[in-house]
Image (tube, rainbow, N blue to C red):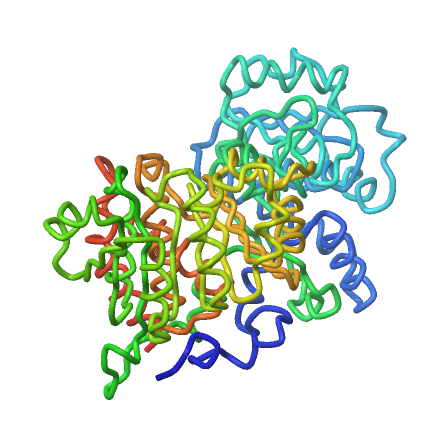
Amino acid sequence: MLYYSEMNLSRRHQAGTGMAMNSIDRALLTPLEMKAADVAALKSGISGVTLMEAAGQAVAEAVSARWPMQPVVVLCGLGNNGGDGFVAARRLAQMGWPVRLGLLGARERLAGDAAYCAALWPGAVEPLSLELLDGAVVVIDALFGSGLSRPVEGQARAVIETLIRRRLPVCAVDVPSGLDGESGGVRGVAAPANVTVTFFRKKPGHLLMPGKQLCGELVVADIGLPAAVLQKIAPHAYENGPEIWLEDYPWPQMDSHKYQRGHAVVVGGAEMTGASRLSAMAAARVGAGLVTLAAPDSAWAIYAAALTSVMVRSLKDPDSLAEMLADTRKNAILIGPGAGVSGQTRQNVLEILATQRGVVLDADALTSFGRDSHRLFAAIAGPCVLTPHEGEFERLFPCEGNKLARTRYAARESGAVVLLKGPDTVIAAPDGRAIINSNAPADLATGGSGDVLSGLIVGLMAQGMEAFLAAAAAAWLHGEAASAFGPGLIAEDLPDALPSVLRRLKARKT
């Protein structure tokens, strides 16, 4: 029998270094990393004006593809973002669009490539003002780029607040002005965009809340930067997608039997029985060869009556869990959903972690440790995934920073893979790998959806998938299943929606 540590772990990930080579298109670049990409491109012989012209052209094309020809106002700042705006204004005017352009600051303060492109603009350059917005039907926001490091103030703030009040259609250049491209946070104020055109690669702030909500439709334009510059930058974060983990996905083989597909265990509780049932069904649906739901004897009949594809095991006394886990074929264990917050749950968690098998800790398993997180972390010695929501996370990890930074810190501190749930779920490994999951629809905001997610993770870990990749694949499958079902989704629908998602995924692999 293959144990967790022996089952199908990719050599690319055993050392905990980097992402799959074919995941480079999913790389996310911070503003500083994007600046480094620009510098590398310039050193390779590509001119800054060439990049700016391509960026402005991409913005003009995005606007002309989404709105009929009508009055457009371009709001420009003094940096390269403003230079992109000057190019977009010129290209739209050449197409016949009526264009007005407003500049934040004196034109004499423009420098470098932005000054060059501004000089090619044949129209008037008006001071940035509220009156500019009168009669505007579409607005191009090129005031501030993704690297803004101060709050938006003064006239720029007044204009952005007017955009918000009037609900004017907006195309943002790189990011909505005021949005921090690294954290997704807002520096004072930011106008929601209908479409945001960014360049070369997305930034973390495009995917992290509230940035994800403010960007609207996100377009990534190719402006001629060679992908080879990414090798020099070595990006630190990625957008989740099959490119990252599909090569490691544990599809059954022709000669597979159920024991080779792993045996997942879900440890449930006596009262909130629905949670662990959802987890167990998800583990089975994602392909675990065997799934056992272990629960207190008082609830055995409830579980047994509700489940057919899942075996139900009664925990009659405090020694029952250890007796069950003596069978080393049970190679991945989930505890937390419906387990109850108690000393017994704490004891069970520590007992499970001592096996050093694949472990997923969720919900009550995390809450049961309250502020005593160091005891929990000290017990983590094998592959482990923690799946807190924000409240559980704050109790375990009292740290500050953006969501990506906090999740990375939590993974290092705990020695476990940490999946911080939300519309912008972040997954980080102790070795520094990190991804942001971007495909979760709002329909997942329903009771029990997190229990399904933890079940998917333990099901994949039972099949030998490395903990970080299992969490990444599960989060993506979770979002795809929800999108496939659509409005009216409840948690029970997620496992049933999964087969169609898996069929499409398998076809993609072949």
Q: Nearer the viewer, residue 154 or 434?
A: 434
Is 232 left, or right, of 363 in this rendering?
Answer: right
Q: Is residue 44 above or below residue 406?
A: below
Is residue 14 visible in the rendered image? The answer is yes
Q: Is residue 235 above or below residue 119?
A: below
Number of marks in the image?
Answer: 0
Q: Is residue 312 above or below residue 227?
A: above
Give residue 336's position: percent from left, percent from top: 39, 47
Residue 87 versus residue 315: which sits nearer the camera?
315
**Residue at x 51%, y 37% (from the top left corner):** 392
Does residue 200 appear in the picture of this structure? no
Quarter occupied by the C terminus: bottom left
Q: Position of residue 262 (x, y in %)?
A: 32, 73
**Foreground pick, 434 / 450:** 450
Decide: is 25 above or below 163.
Answer: below
Give me the residue at 42% from left, 79% from top: 7
Q: Quadrant of residue 192?
A: top right
Residue shown at the point (19%, 62%) measured from the top left? 311
312 displayed left or right of 123? left
Q: Could you say where residue 331 lies in the image, as x and y percent from the top left? A: 38, 70
Please identify the residue farthest to the bottom as the structure is shown: 255
Question: Residue 495: x and y, percent?
Answer: 24, 53
Q: Quadrant of the N terminus?
A: bottom left
